[in-house]
Image (spheres, rainbow, N blue to C red):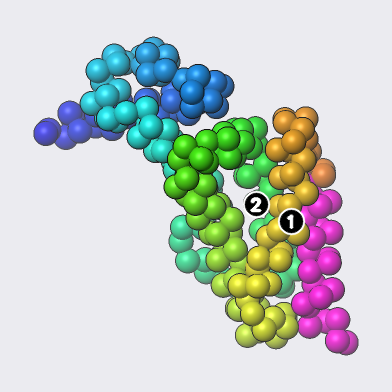
Amino acid sequence: MTSGAATRRRRSRQKIVTAAGDVFLETGFLGASMDTIADRAGVSKQTVYAHFASKEALFIHVVEAMTGGAARDLREDVEEALDDRPVEDYLNRTAIDQLTIVMTPALMRLRRMVIGEVDRFPALGRSLFENGPRKSIDKLARAFAHYTARGQLDVSDPADAATLFNWMLMGAPTNSAMLLGDAGLPTPAQIEAHAAETVRIFLAAYGTSRHD
């Protein structure tokens, strides 16, 4: 395959994935058809099947692409170069970034869709967890170990502390958005306030300044 043909194939595949994501989020897995996806992508149905053998395979790819994209936006796929900034500054910035990137209509609709299809595609729930909460928790655990070593945190188990922080941060906003739809998504001001309160409570329990 020539480089030009490979480029055209990549572009065609990306158009299909983008169109499929829109269609799946609008209609759910059962309501989506390959004809609709092909029309939305501006390609033939045969082209869709040349890239993805079935609607199931395309659905799985879309879910993994969307959750993986959020992880990349949060730079959870790379080892973070932790610097000398105070732990409170790090946690506030991380919390605001995580809420801003995750608490979007598209990702919340994806979450609802995956939960609705978990019996049909049990691996999808695991994929959503591994590409979402698991990567966030692992990133936080590395940071907590770093700040404990620097004397700014007193954390005996970084993974446990990271799990606690993650769900303190994400639990209420996610539950609200899942049950109330887009109306339940937090505003930027609410994101900043919730992030600050989560960090305050966490540092009251784990910050070394509490001993002063």
Is residue 204 rendered magenta in the image? yes
From what the image shows, is residue 110 above or below residue 12?
below
Q: Between 56 and 93, which is closer to the camera in this rendering? A: 56
Please, what is the dominant secondary structure of the magenta stretch?
helix
What is the x, y in percent for residue 110?
A: 57, 36
- Residue in view at x 52 percent, y 47 percent: 125
- Near mark 1 (Cα within 10 A), the count class, few <14, some 14-19 or many ≥20, is many
- Near mark 2 (Cα within 10 A), the count class, few <14, some 14-19 or many ≥20, is many
Q: Earlier in the sequence, mark 1 or mark 2?
A: 2
What is the x, y in percent for residue 102?
A: 63, 45
Q: Between 187 and 86, which is closer to the camera in this rendering? A: 187
Q: Amino acid at mark 1?
A: Leu
The residue range painted magenta reads: 191-212
Occupied quadrant, residue 166: bottom right
Q: Which mark is residue 169?
A: 1
Quarter in which the C terminus is drawn:
bottom right
What is the x, y in percent for residue 39?
A: 39, 12
Occupied quadrant, residue 140: bottom right
